[in-house]
Image (cartoon, rainbow, N blue to C red):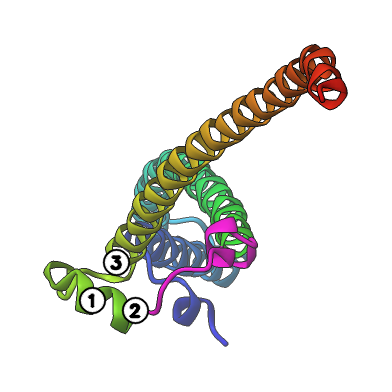
């Protein structure tokens, strides 16, 4: 592939064109000098050589300017490329950090989804039965419905616990009442025994009476 087919940047294309032009002018100058090597040096030959040298020097000066501009442009391009590369590296690092964070969050989500939550083990009433009792929750989403069912279960358990405490108090009261009655009966038995013991002499007198 030819160089002019590879290079497409306008500044470099101009350098190549002027370089080709200077090369052709140098070859032309050499041909003039070689062709007149055996001929006497005339004023016309000197004038032609001077003219061709002037063209060549002009092309070389132009080539130097284009080369200098190309060097400056290359430096600027390298600087911009370095800046762009730094920006790409920074964005790539951010992308990697986001990727790692995404993986971390996905792991946390998976752990949360697979976690054995205690509320899943609660003996809640079926959804249909709950909605039959609490129709105002019919339009709730899954989370709101679960929270309402748990709150309902808590309320029910608190009510049952209150009933249990009341029954326990009644039980304690009945136990105390039974103990008091038992003590009263025991005291009554003791009083009867004392009464019988006290009545024995009188009974003996009645038995001895004619």
The reply to whether discs 1 and 2 touch (Cβ–Cβ < 8 Å) is yes
Residue 117 belongs to the span the image colors magenta: yes
Image position of 177 (left or right of 5): right
Depth-wise, is mark 3 or mark 2 nearer the camera?
Answer: 2
Q: Quadrant of residue 175?
A: top right
Q: CA distance from mark 3 to mark 1?
A: 9 Å
Disc nearer the start of the sequence (3/2) = 2
Kind of element beneath mark 1: helix
Identify the residue position indicated by label 2 in the image.
Answer: 127
Q: Is residue 54 above or below residue 122?
A: above
Q: Residues within 10 Å of mark 3 (few under 14, many from 20)?
A: some
Q: Is residue 41 above or below residue 125?
A: above
**Residue at 84% across / 26% down in the picture?**
207
Q: CA distance from mark 3 to mark 2?
A: 9 Å
Residue nearer the viewer, 112 or 156: 156
Give coordinates of residue 9: x percent, y percent: 37, 64
Residue 207 belongs to the span the image colors magenta: no
Identify the residue position indicated by label 1 in the image.
Answer: 131
Bounds of the magenta segment: 113-126
The reply to whether discs 3 and 2 touch (Cβ–Cβ < 8 Å) is yes
The reply to whether discs 3 and 1 touch (Cβ–Cβ < 8 Å) is no
Give coordinates of residue 199: x percent, y percent: 77, 17
Kind of element beneath mark 2: helix
């Amino acid at each position: 592939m030819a160089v002019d087919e590879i290079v497409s940047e306008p500044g470099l294309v101009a350098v190549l064109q002027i370089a080709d032009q200077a090369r052709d002018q140098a070859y032309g100058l050499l041909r003039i000098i070689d062709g007149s090597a055996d001929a006497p040096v005339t004023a016309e030959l000197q004038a032609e050589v001077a003219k061709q040298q002037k063209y060549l020097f002009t092309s070389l000066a132009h080539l130097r300017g284009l080369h200098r501009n190309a060097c400056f442009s290359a430096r600027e391009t390298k600087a911009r490329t370095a800046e762009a590369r730094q920006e790409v590296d920074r964005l790539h690092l951010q992308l990697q950090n986001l990727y790692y964070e995404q993986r971390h969050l996905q792991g946390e989500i998976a752990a949360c989804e697979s976690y054995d939550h205690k509320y899943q083990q609660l003996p809640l009433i079926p959804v249909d039965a709950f909605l039959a009792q609490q129709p105002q929750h019919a339009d709730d989403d899954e989370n709101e419905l679960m929270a309402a069912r748990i709150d309902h279960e808590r309320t029910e358990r608190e009510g049952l616990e209150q009933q249990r405490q009341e029954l326990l108090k009644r039980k304690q009261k009945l136990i105390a009442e039974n103990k008091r009655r038992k003590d009263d009966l025991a005291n009554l038995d003791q009083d009867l025994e004392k009464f019988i013991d006290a009545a024995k002499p009188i009974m003996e007198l009645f038995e001895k009476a004619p």
